[in-house]
Amino acid sequence: MICGKGGTGKSVISVLMARILSRKYNVYLIDSDESNTLLPEMLGAPQPKPLVEYLGGRGSVFKRGEVNIVRALSKAGRGVVLKNLPDQYVSKSPEGIGLIVIGKVRNYSEGCACPLNYLTRTLLKHLVLDEDEVVLVVTDAGIEHIGRGVEEGSDAVLAVVDPTAESLSLAKTLKEQIKPLKKKFWLVLNKATPEVADIIIEKAKGMGLEVNGVIGFDEKIFKSCLEGGVLKAEKSMSQVENVLKAINLL
């Protein structure tokens, strides 16, 4: 799970991680952020239908409950196999990365994102993966997903921080809250100059946090995010690759 406060670059880091990991694995990227909508464009994949619609919409999620959600998403009834989901709910990038969108909040007074978080949690808890499959989950900004227990079904949490005290504080909360779950926790500093990186690393250390990798400011990413469309990166690709090696995913 890729977590962090809004604006740290979770979507960007997730897309770059997915591209690199897709050289070795079959990768799925699950968009669990109920607000941002441009992940398909960044990935270069068609917009899939929201998975929540497969279950009848947000109003049906809590009514179905965990058991019935799993039955609906599983053909064999033994867990959720992503490659078995209907094609309209899983789109593919040019690299073959599968994209699944949980759902979005778009209309005034339509309600909170609680059903969407519940669906993500249920999906992750009952995933059945092959040895060559990797799933990355982009969470909503902040820590609401912790309140919904979404982390229960994950193997690890990667917190993305930018050079702000607020993002470090939130990362510390994330680490503390998942500690009882015995999940792996990694911390990546994004959009940092070398001088700022040294300051943040030292500050993080004083808070009991270890920075597992640093990704600098990439002008190509900045421009492509401004223009929209497929994400373009330059030096950040090698830096993200170094992060994946540091946390033993490559």
Image: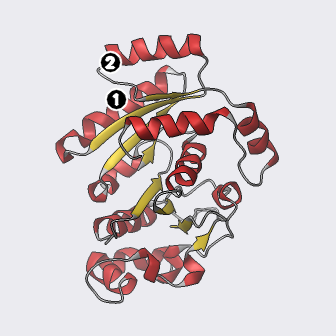
- Is there CB contact under 8 Å for labels 2 and 1? yes
* 2 or 1: tag closer to the N-terminus: 1
Q: Secondary structure at mark 1?
A: helix
Q: What is the number of the mark on residue 91?
A: none
The one nearer the camera, 34 or 62, is 34
Image position of 121 with respect to 14: above or below: below
- Residue under the image location 29 percent in, 21 percent down: 208
What's under tag 2, amino acid-wise? Met
Q: Residue furthest bottom?
A: 75
Which mark is on residue 207?
A: 2
Q: Is residue 59 left or right of residue 207?
A: right
Residue 109 appears in which quarter of the rendering? bottom right
Q: Is residue 75 above or below residue 169?
A: below
The residue singled out by tag 1 in the image is 172
Q: Is residue 152 left or right of residue 50?
A: left
Residue shown at 40%/25% (left/top)?
A: 211
